[in-house]
Amino acid sequence: AQRIVVKIGTSTLTHSNGKLNLQAIDQLCYSLSGLVNDGKEIVLVSSGAIGVGLGQLGIKERPSSIPEQQALAAIGQTQLMTVYQQRFSVYGQKIGQILLTHDVMDYPKSRENVLNTFENLLKLNVIPIVNENDTVAVDELDHHTKFGDNDQLSAIVTTLIDADLLVMLSDIDGFYDKNPRKFEDAKLIQTVNTITDETFMKASGTGTKFGTGGMTTKLRAAQKMLTENKAMILANGENPSVIFEILNGKQVGTLFV
Ligand code: ADP
């Protein structure tokens, strides 16, 4: 079986007003369930807990204080999982929740426990849905650390479970030679084989209002994948069924290989 990790960002899961994009979520659930039916092993790394928490409390801006973000994440996470549960069940797909911290790899015992959980869920044809445990760790919340919006976490998970491919779904068609939101003449790069300082120069600033990572953290994730001899595809998650095209070998987005 092919083992694939799919990471979906806040910008894809939520509308610009912070409300959940239920169409996108439904299409994601439909697509991933279809892949499991085809015999693939799928892990979903989903952001969006804070965005959903904001929407639930009717708050417009993401608070800057970490403790407030942690509370929002706790509120939003259950709602997010409820929506996933509902939408996946329509397609007969079972899910399990895995909340992780970045240091799982550092402690052999926790690493083993986490890996065992993944392996057994996958054996049962269940899709594990992963997010950072924001109560315990705030790596993804702190804008000033090198982490962002689960991009690193998805690379860590891909390595841990020895998946073949990391599919990163974002709000942009792929990686461009400069930020396409700022430069109209930006060109999509189809394949990236090495990541250097020059590559990082092409990714400027952070992303959207509700997202946190921006392109820099995606490049870091890609860099980790390349050193592990794994592939990563960055594509637009606007229509999550794009995953079918990717797995059918169509040229979509940017392939880091
Ligand atoms: P997500 O919420 O899906 O993780 P982000 O909003 O954090 O996504 O990151 C994607 C954003 O990165 C794009 O929308 C774009 O504004 C920005 N970006 C910066 N440089 C580039 C680049 N060279 N190519 C593509 N996107 C870039």
Image: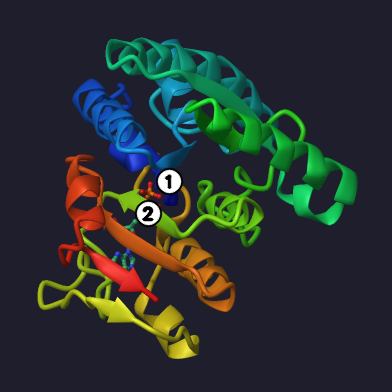
Q: Residue at x 65, y 58 (%)?
A: 145
Q: Is residue 36 above or below residue 172?
A: above
Q: Amino acid at mark 1?
A: Lys
Q: Residue at x 59, y 29 (%)?
A: 121
Q: Amino acid at mark 2?
A: Val
- Residue 167's label in the rendered image is 2
Q: Secondary structure at mark 2?
A: strand
Q: Is residue 73 above or below residue 140?
A: above
Residue 245 placement (x, y as % from top left)? 17, 52
- Contact between marks 2 and 1 (CB within 8 A): the answer is yes
Q: Nearer the viewer, residue 6 or 219?
A: 6
Note whether ligand 1 is within 8 Å of mark 1: yes
Residue 164 placement (x, y as % from top left)? 47, 60
Label 1 neighbourhood size at 10 Å, few (<14), some (14-19), many (20+)? many
Residue 149 placement (x, y as % from top left)? 51, 47
Q: Residue at x 45, y 41 (%)?
A: 41
Displayed-image quarter of ligand 1? bottom left
Identify the residue position indicated by label 1 in the image: 7
Q: Can residue 63 be spotted in the picture?
A: no
Residue 194 placement (x, y as % from top left)? 44, 86
